[in-house]
Image (cartoon, grey):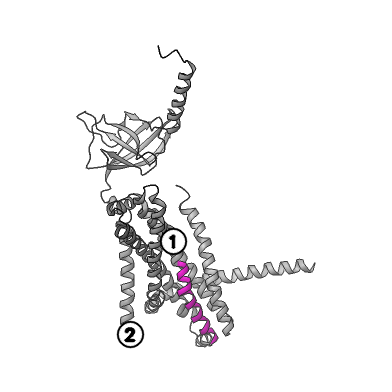
């Protein structure tokens, strides 16, 4: 009987946490139009979230492009199909790796800083002080960061894919000597703007919403202690990474189920 | 950093993002090939379309001149109906014939159009009459085995 009660209590707690997160998300969406009216706040956040993540995104994208091109070359050279190298690198980057890896890096670089910032604002009672002055913290603090993340993430993912393709071009065409004309023309022949590039952008937009919302929620709901902030920052990375990977599977199944 | 500097940096960030998107669309995908989208649609019937897919190229002398738009099955004749869009700049005689070809031994299948001799050209909505179905590798192998078996069955019959 006791264990049954414990199970019920656990289930209720999980449901409560889910509902809490969902109502936080709805509040966030509701506060978004207010953030758009004060666009200077959003611009500052795009700078903090987007511009400052550029280095790690570009460096990782270039490295992924290099490595993909090298490994694919070794596999393809056996079949004399090295011209398809560009196509494989392009499709894997634009469809999957670009949005997903960029989102994982985004969660690590920008998500944690959002959580820590808001967590410390809460620990330092700045949030409470603002609310006492009747400032709506959701539209003043949370919403600009949300919009900033939502705008930055697709741009970062696009840049990741682009620099990755350029990296693959450097390795394949300049270093190995794959024919440049075939490298580009097979890509242009087989990669569809809407189906591949467009869906990739849609994915990264969804991931941007997930990562930013998770980071803001963890920061806003943290217990106002140093340990609480540390725990919330860790949770941000874990929860957003897992949600991105899970969501990617669902989106891929929806987008590419028909061949 | 001043507000002005931050705004400039963000503007730059968004701008290179857009440039990257344009690069992906034009250089690394097929947006550039969409530029002359007006074409005319003709259809053809095949006994077997093999592995032909929507968006497969239509080629004449190896040059891509159009794409397959849709594939369906005629419920009465049980033939595959392939509709293709040919670019407006290319005109073909009415009695042109279509073949389903394969690029390389195991590559993708595409349509090859062979121009005929008639004076009138194909117009939108026409049905191309002369078609040659895809070569199905299994049938080919089956036929070969059958021939071998037939030869083996009459050892001194055919050699006379």
| Residue highlighted by disc 1 | A97
Give the residue at the far top of this rendering.
B160
Which residues, given as a range, are shown in magenta?
A103-123
Prevalent SS, magenta region: helix
Which dot marks residue B85? none
Left-right relation of A12 to A75: right
**Residue A116 covered by magenta stretch:** yes
> What is the distance, in whole Å, between disc 1 and disc 2 at their CAs?
36 Å
Q: Dot 1 lies on which element? A: helix
Chain identity of mark 1: A
Q: Position of residue A52 (x, y in %)?
A: 39, 76
Q: Position of residue A44 (x, y in %)?
A: 38, 79
Give the residue at the far left of this rendering.
B119
Q: Position of residue A81 (x, y in %)?
A: 36, 48
Foreground residue, A92 or A5?
A92
Which dot marks residue B2? 2
Left-right relation of B80 to B123: right
- Residue A151 visible somewhere in the drawing: no
Mark 1 Cα shell of 10 Å, populated few (<14), some (14-19), many (≥20): many
Could you say which quadrant of the image residue A165 lies in?
bottom left
Foreground residue, A250 or A91?
A91
Chain identity of mark 2: B
Q: Dot 2 lies on which element? A: loop
Q: Residue at x 22, y 33 (%)?
A: B121
Q: Is residue A58 above or below residue A256?
A: below
Give the residue at the far right of this rendering.
A1
Of badges 1 and 2, the one in the foreground is: 1
């Amino acid at each position: 009987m006791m264990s049954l009660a414990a199970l019920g209590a656990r289930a209720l707690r999980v449901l409560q946490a889910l509902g809490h997160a969902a109502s936080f998300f709805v509040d966030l969406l509701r506060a978004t139009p207010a953030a758009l009216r004060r666009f200077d706040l959003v611009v500052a956040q795009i700078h903090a979230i987007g511009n400052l993540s550029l280095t790690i995104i570009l460096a990782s994208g270039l490295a992924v492009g290099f490595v993909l091109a090298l490994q694919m070359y070794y596999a393809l050279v056996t079949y004399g199909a090295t011209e398809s190298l560009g196509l494989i690198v392009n499709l894997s980057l634009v469809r999957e790796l670009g949005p997903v890896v960029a989102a994982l890096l985004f969660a690590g670089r920008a998500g944690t800083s959002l959580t820590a910032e808001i967590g410390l604002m809460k620990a330092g009672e700045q949030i409470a002080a603002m609310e006492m002055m009747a400032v709506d913290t959701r539209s003043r603090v949370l919403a600009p960061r949300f919009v900033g993340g939502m705008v930055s993430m697709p741009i970062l993912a696009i840049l990741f894919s682009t620099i990755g393709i350029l990296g693959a071009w450097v390795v394949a065409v300049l270093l190995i000597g794959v024919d440049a004309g075939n490298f580009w023309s097979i890509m242009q022949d087989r990669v569809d703007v809407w189906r591949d590039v467009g869906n990739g952008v849609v994915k990264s937009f969804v991931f941007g919403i997930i990562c930013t919302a998770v980071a803001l929620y963890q920061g806003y709901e943290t217990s106002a202690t140093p340990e609480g902030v540390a725990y919330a920052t860790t949770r941000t990375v874990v929860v957003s990474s897992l949600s991105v990977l899970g969501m990617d599977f669902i989106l891929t199944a929806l987008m590419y189920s028909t061949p | 950093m001043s507000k002005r500097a931050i705004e400039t940096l963000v503007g730059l960030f968004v701008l290179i993002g857009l440039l990257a998107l344009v690069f992906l669309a034009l250089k690394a995908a097929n947006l550039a090939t969409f530029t002359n989208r007006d074409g005319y649609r003709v259809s053809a019937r095949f006994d077997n379309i093999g592995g032909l897919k929507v968006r497969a190229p239509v080629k004449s002398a190896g040059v891509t001149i159009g794409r397959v738009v849709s594939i369906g099955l005629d419920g009465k004749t049980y033939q595959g109906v392939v509709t293709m869009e040919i670019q407006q700049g290319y005109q073909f005689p009415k009695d042109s014939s279509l073949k389903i070809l394969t690029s390389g031994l195991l590559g993708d299948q595409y349509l090859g159009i062979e121009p005929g001799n008639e004076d009138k050209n194909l117009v939108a909505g026409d049905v191309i009459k002369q078609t040659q179905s895809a070569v199905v590798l299994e049938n080919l192998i089956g036929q070969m085995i059958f021939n071998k078996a037939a030869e083996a069955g009459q050892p001194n019959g055919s050699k006379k």
